[in-house]
Image (tube, rainbow, N blue to C red):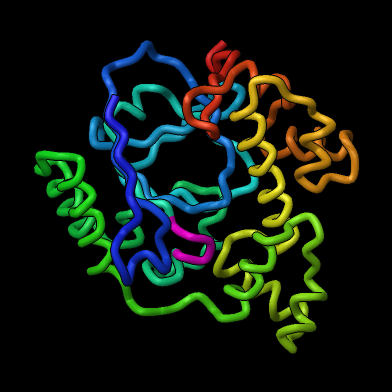
Amino acid sequence: MIYVSRRPAPPLDASVSAVWYFKSAPRPFGFERVLPKGRAQLIVNLKDDRTRTYDEHGGCVEAPGAVVSGLGPRFEIIDTDEQEHVVGVVFRPGGTTGFFRDSAWAMRGRDVSLEALWGVTGTALLREALLAAHTPEAALDVLERALLEARHGRETHAAVTFALARFHRQPEVARVGAVTDALGMSAKRFIERFKAEVGLTPKQYCRLLRFQRAVTTAHADADIDWSDVALACGYFDQAHFIHDFREFSGLTPGAYRSGRTVFPNHVTFLQSPAS
């Protein structure tokens, strides 16, 4: 397995937290649950120019092989074949603003074809250049050049940047009122701006931050006390913690632990969607 990830050079690093490359030997066909991470991604499947997602009842939706996966509040189900040779871009919250005309709210919870955003020709040229790259680092160079060419200079609104910094510091106590009071901005205007640039409401986003803190803790610890996790991640009690965990992942915390993989947000789908 080859996995290479790096922070891009300025000015991209202000909007993009990482570009990554993944390649593995073929694995037995199976399904994995991908948990919501609070980051939009651009993903290009280099093995097969298709993207497939599944529902819990066996339904499959196909899209082209290059997509922008919008920030969403629920998990996706993908197959192992689709992960064999993939490259991607992880945007910072609000970071898609500088590269795509579509709002983050319009892309929320969806895999949007890159052709619809950057055009058929531009997407085809990107794929060709990625396939021609001889090393993982060369492929990441291709991604960075494509991002620089697509960058149109629109910046994340200062109010959204301010709010994101505050929410990341203390998502368990974040309040829209405290943010808007500090900004001198109406709650309605702030929420609409936040939705457009981040893809979730401020409340949903803070809940997702708390959930991701719990996932990180659960993935790392060999011996875990769920009550301690709930408290450390800012939940009122264990019942609220389990409710949120189920809503975002479709799993109990214990089921997550049983099915986790080497990547914190990928979980083996214990029951095949096709069954």
Which of the 4 quarters of the picture holds residue 117?
bottom left
Establish if 272 lies above or below 121.
above
Establish if 269 lies above or below 39.
above
Q: Position of residue 106 (x, y in %)?
A: 54, 61
Left or right: 184 as drawn, with respect to 193: right
Q: Position of residue 158 (x, y in %)?
A: 57, 81
* Residue found at x 89% / y 34%: 239
* Residue found at x 40% / y 22%: 80
Quadrant into which the C terminus falls: top right
* Residue found at x 53% / y 61%: 93
Establish if 30 lies above or below 50.
above
Q: How many labels, in total?
A: 0
Quadrant into which the N terminus falls: top left
Q: Is residue 92 magenta?
A: yes
**Magenta region: which residues?**
91-95
User: Which of 10/193 is in front?
Assistant: 10
Secondary structure mostly seen in magenta is: loop
Say whether residue 19 is visible.
Answer: yes
* Residue found at x 71% / y 85%: 183
Left or right: 194 as drawn, with respect to 59: right
Q: Position of residue 29 (x, y in %)?
A: 39, 14
Left or right: 274 as drawn, with respect to 166: left
Q: Is residue 177 magenta?
A: no
Say whether residue 113 is visible.
Answer: no
